[in-house]
Image: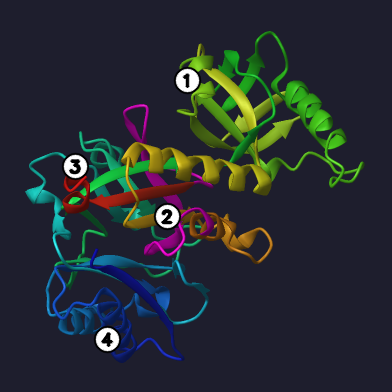
Amino acid sequence: MKVATSILLGNKATPALVAEAVAKAMLKADISIANSVLLLLTTEFADNPQPAIKAAAKAANCTQVFGCSATGIFTEEDWVLDSPAVAVMVFGGDVSIHSAKFNHTQQALLTLTAPNAINSTWLNDGNARYGGVSGDALGQGPFSVWKNAKADSTGRIEAFFTGVKLATKASHGLKLLTKPKKIQHINGYDIELLDNKSPFAALQKAWESHRKSNANIKSDTTLPSHLVMAVYASSAEVIHKGEYEQANLISVDESTGSITLAQTLEVGQYLCWGLRDQATAEADLVLTTQSLTKELGAKADFGLLFSCIGRGPFYDGIDHDLKVITQQLPNMPLLGFYGNSEIATIGGKNQLLPYSAVLSLFSELATLNLK
């Protein structure tokens, strides 16, 4: 398999740094001409990425260069935040990347986008998608995307792989605190009644139970509302299958027991409360990796990971997402970035996911056909 990555840090965001990173990956892949390149640059390159993109194309001897800028980037070897850096994956042999307009077989689309380039019509245009939103935690800062070795003014790119079998899945990493209950009354963004009970009372009771069962949580710790997510779907069964949608909790009204969410839901939907939790996130990503490997039915030749900027190293300075993948799939070339949101197809619908990790594994068809 002629796929390899490299990651390099520099004092400045220069085209020379990009050229060196591409040359290093080409050497590891044992190729002198790349079919295509996935190029990720930190935000120091974002205002004027074209010289860096051109350097990548020249070093790879190809114009099929796709990618974006991001706050943090990584490969299987290392991760970088807050420093000028380049992460690259090069492709040779039978594997290549192409613009979405040539996707006649309707393969799921690798989708990289800036926050201001997203709209619901485009997101659910009939194509299955996986990828990430390039942005910091607030969706601000300089961002850029590129395809065919040129910066793209639309703010988003779509591409697909040839010569591979793909398996992709989102890992939410939420610890569900309550059972799904039917929404009975809403008022705009406020959830006012769940299964004849106060939403806040049910959430507070669940938190107290969770706190008492966890020795690492101090007895006087109040409900960490910034870590709580509303998990909702059309039925309890869909939630149990993990094919739910999520909404951030904005505020609670203890006097009325209502909870305000970041988006409106509907009466008749089912809702439960989930807690962002490091141990759960790590365990869930292990299961996701194992599930995708089983779905492929073969060794994964390379992978892409798009992880929320609120996960990974932001728990305790160690990127647990990256640690899981490298332990489960040692020596597999891996490329990805920390983003503002993640994109995945769940229950037949493309979703923008908060605090999730979207993992995509690929096996070369030429290898599969030999079995």
Cα distance, mark 2 to mark 4? 24 Å
Residue to which mark 1 is pinned: 238
Q: Is residue 343 magenta?
A: yes
Tell me which amino acid carries mark 3.
Gln
| Relative vertical location of residue 333 with respect to residue 9 in this rendering, above or below | above
Asked where in the image residue 26 lies, by quadrant, the reply is: bottom left
- Whichever of callouts 3 and 2 sits on the residue coming sooner in the sequence is 3
Q: Give the numbered dot on residue 19.
A: 4
* Left or right relative to 217: residue 131: left
**Residue 334: percent from left, percent from top:** 39, 62
Other residues around mark 4 within 10 Å, as few (<14) / some (14–19) / many (≥20): many
Q: Amino acid at mark 2?
A: Phe
Which residue does the numbered mark 2 point to in the structure image? 306
The residue depicted at 86 percent of the width and 44 percent of the height is 221
**Of the residues shown, which amino acid type is indicated by label 4?**
Ala
In this picture, which residue range is highlighted in magenta?
A: 327-356
Mark 3: which secondary structure?
Answer: loop
- Residue 331 visible? The answer is yes
The residue pinned by badge 3 equals 107
Above or below for 359 versus 184: below
Q: Are marks 1 and 3 in contact (CB under 8 Å)?
A: no
Of pointers 4 and 3, the one earlier in the residue sequence: 4
User: What's the mark number on residue 132?
Assistant: none
Mark 1: few/some/many CA within 10 Å (<14, 14-19, 20+): some
> In terms of depth relative to the viewer, which is nearer, 259 or 247?
247
Residue 93 image-quadrant placement: bottom left
Q: Nearer the viewer, residue 135 or 304?
A: 304
